[in-house]
């Protein structure tokens, strides 16, 4: 995208309204043309001022019924307008007093929100596990070992097949309003397959995560110490150049806290930021380990001890970007790509975010995480899709928002915040997830007067159009 803005109609009604975006959901089909952008906008790019946001160009979106900026003093405003210039939000205010711009888009009273930041996905894989899903719906329990069947299919697939699958999912994501995505490896589990998955993922996003410690692969059963040594040795050497983050699945049937500590510590020593999967299947020490190691996020958090909630709540808060260190990004935050090193539009979140993945509970018929307990304890919460063929084969952040509101005790405002700003915090990014002046101009227009409709009208394609300015 090279810093240029693009716009794609995404919903079924795309192109019908004042914003005039062209193309239906397929407009996102050019997914993943450049690093970090959730799908090049493809055919929709020439519509309504799109593709024209090169150096010096400005776009005014006016007549926004409700605009969510996440500005601390005024997180949302009605009758609003926003100006994007050089790919950044340059002005926010009342529509009546909006400045002129090179191009004008009439939002027609729609609600505008920041693009979704999907901070947890596993998009590079082959095959599907529909039969396993059906068995679960008939009463079978989800087990981490199912991952091995996707590993076998992924190892057998070509690079072109893996990339085509990931691009298809990125296109789905873009059509549903996601503008930044994190992608994990974890379905290769050999040195060659993990590094090729990450090098493919790197062509799609800057937010790549090395997850060699997803499960112990079949050929290492009975030799798990050897596999752990491989993950933190030769496999880490091959994968670190393609990764910003390192992750370990700490749970029943996966890795222990001690194994995870040794793997994550090795990754941090290589300059990767830590992330952890924990609390999906049972309480473990994985959440406290994540906090102890300064992990940016601990994901799932379905089963939590009181001590886990206290540890998350007590993890460090926001840190000014001017505080020195690696671009202001503290402790184990991942310094390889400089992706967090952005314009001065806020403070980097230095604590450990609890990333909730309600698509997993939906798809495994499990109890949902208790978001209220976390929010009331003062924990920063993110929502993500966990898009993968086993536990959560959804690419839809609106679906996750609907589940969070219906099943997890979140208000619609909290859920939208968690799906945007929360995701940015979980990636230690300050340039995305909000629409304050200086932010990336990543904006979703909803075919609705309010974001509440994302939960109130579940399953309805409410994303009218998506404007993407960020480059990573
Ligand atoms: O995040 N929990 C571990 N990994 C994935 C599941 C992967 C799979 O079942 O294939 C998850 O849910
Ligand atoms: Fe996951």
Image: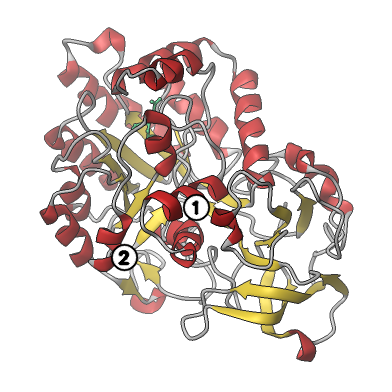
Q: Pick the residue in front: 5 or 356.
A: 356
Q: Which mark is residue 401?
A: 1
Disc 1 + disc 2, Cβ < 8 Å: no
Q: Which residue lies furthest to the bottom in this view?
A: 97
Q: Pick the residue in front: 331 or 456.
A: 456
Residue 450 shows in this picture: yes
Q: Where is residue 352 shown, x and y percent of the image?
A: 28, 58
What is the image's colouring?
secondary structure
Q: In this view, does 4 lie to the left or right of 235?
A: right
Q: Where is residue 341 shown, x and y percent of the image?
A: 48, 65
- Classify residue 362 by image quadrant: top left
- Classify residue 64 by image quadrant: bottom right
Q: Pick the residue in front: 16 or 224.
A: 16
- 1 or 2: tag closer to the N-terminus: 2
Tell me the SS state at disc 2.
loop
Q: Is residue 435 left or right of residue 275?
A: right
Q: Where is residue 147 shown, x and y percent of the image?
A: 37, 20
Seen at 85% across and 84% down, the residue is 100
Is 237 above or below relative to 107? above
Q: Where is residue 29 shown, x and y percent of the image?
A: 75, 37
Residue 335 shows in this picture: no
Q: Which residue is identified by label 2?
A: 350
Q: How many labels does the image show?
A: 2
- Front label number (1 vs 2): 1
The Cα atoms of the two marked residues, 1 and 2, are separated by 24 Å
Is 355 above or below relative to 316? above
Q: Does the residue labelled 2 lie within 8 Å of ligand 2?
A: no
């Amino acid at each position: 995208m090279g810093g240029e803005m693009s716009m794609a109609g995404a919903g079924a009604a795309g192109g019908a309204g004042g914003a005039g975006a062209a193309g239906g959901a397929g407009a996102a089909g050019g997914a993943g043309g450049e690093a970090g952008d959730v799908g090049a906008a493809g055919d929709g790019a020439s519509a309504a001022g799109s593709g024209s946001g090169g150096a010096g160009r400005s776009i005014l979106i006016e007549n926004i019924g409700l605009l969510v900026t996440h500005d601390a003093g005024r997180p949302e405003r009605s009758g609003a307008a926003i100006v994007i210039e050089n790919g950044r939000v340059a002005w926010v205010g009342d529509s009546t007093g909006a400045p002129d711009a090179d191009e004008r888009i009439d939002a027609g009273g729609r609600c505008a929100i920041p693009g979704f930041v999907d901070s947890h996905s596993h998009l590079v894989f082959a095959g599907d596990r529909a039969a396993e899903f059906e068995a679960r719906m008939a009463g079978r329990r989800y087990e981490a070992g199912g991952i091995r069947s996707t590993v076998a299919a992924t190892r057998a697939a070509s690079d072109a097949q893996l990339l085509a699958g990931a691009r298809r999912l990125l296109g789905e994501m873009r059509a549903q309003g996601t503008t930044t995505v994190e992608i994990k490896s974890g379905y290769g589990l050999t040195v060659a397959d993990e590094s090729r998955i990450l090098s493919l993922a790197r062509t799609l996003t800057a937010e790549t995560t090395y997850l060699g410690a997803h499960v112990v692969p079949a050929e290492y059963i009975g030799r798990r110490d050897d596999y752990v040594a491989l993950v933190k040795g030769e496999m880490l050497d091959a994968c670190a150049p393609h990764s910003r983050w390192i992750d370990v699945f700490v749970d029943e049937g996966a890795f222990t806290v001690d194994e995870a500590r040794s793997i994550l510590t090795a990754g941090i020593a290589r300059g990767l930021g830590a992330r952890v999967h924990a609390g999906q299947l049972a309480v473990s020490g994985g959440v406290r380990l994540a906090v102890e190691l300064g992990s940016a996020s601990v994901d799932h958090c379905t089963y939590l001890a009181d001590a886990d909630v206290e540890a998350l709540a007590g993890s460090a808060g926001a840190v000014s970007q001017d505080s020195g260190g690696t671009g202001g990004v503290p402790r184990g935050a991942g310094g390889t790509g400089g992706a967090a090193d952005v314009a001065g539009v806020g403070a980097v979140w230095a604590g450990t975010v609890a990333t909730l993945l309600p698509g997993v509970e939906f798809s495994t018929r499990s109890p949902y995480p208790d978001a209220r307990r976390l929010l009331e304890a003062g924990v920063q919460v993110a929502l993500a899709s966990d898009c993968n063929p086993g536990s959560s084969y959804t690419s839809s952040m609106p679906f996750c928002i609907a589940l969070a509101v219906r099943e997890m005790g979140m208000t619609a405002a909290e859920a939208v915040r968690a799906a945007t700003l929360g995701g940015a915090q979980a990636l230690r990014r300050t340039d995305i997830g909000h629409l304050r002046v200086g932010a990336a101009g990543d904006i979703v227009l909803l075919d609705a007067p309010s974001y509440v409709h994302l939960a109130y009208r579940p399953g309805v394609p409410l994303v009218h159009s998506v404007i993407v300015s960020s480059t990573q």
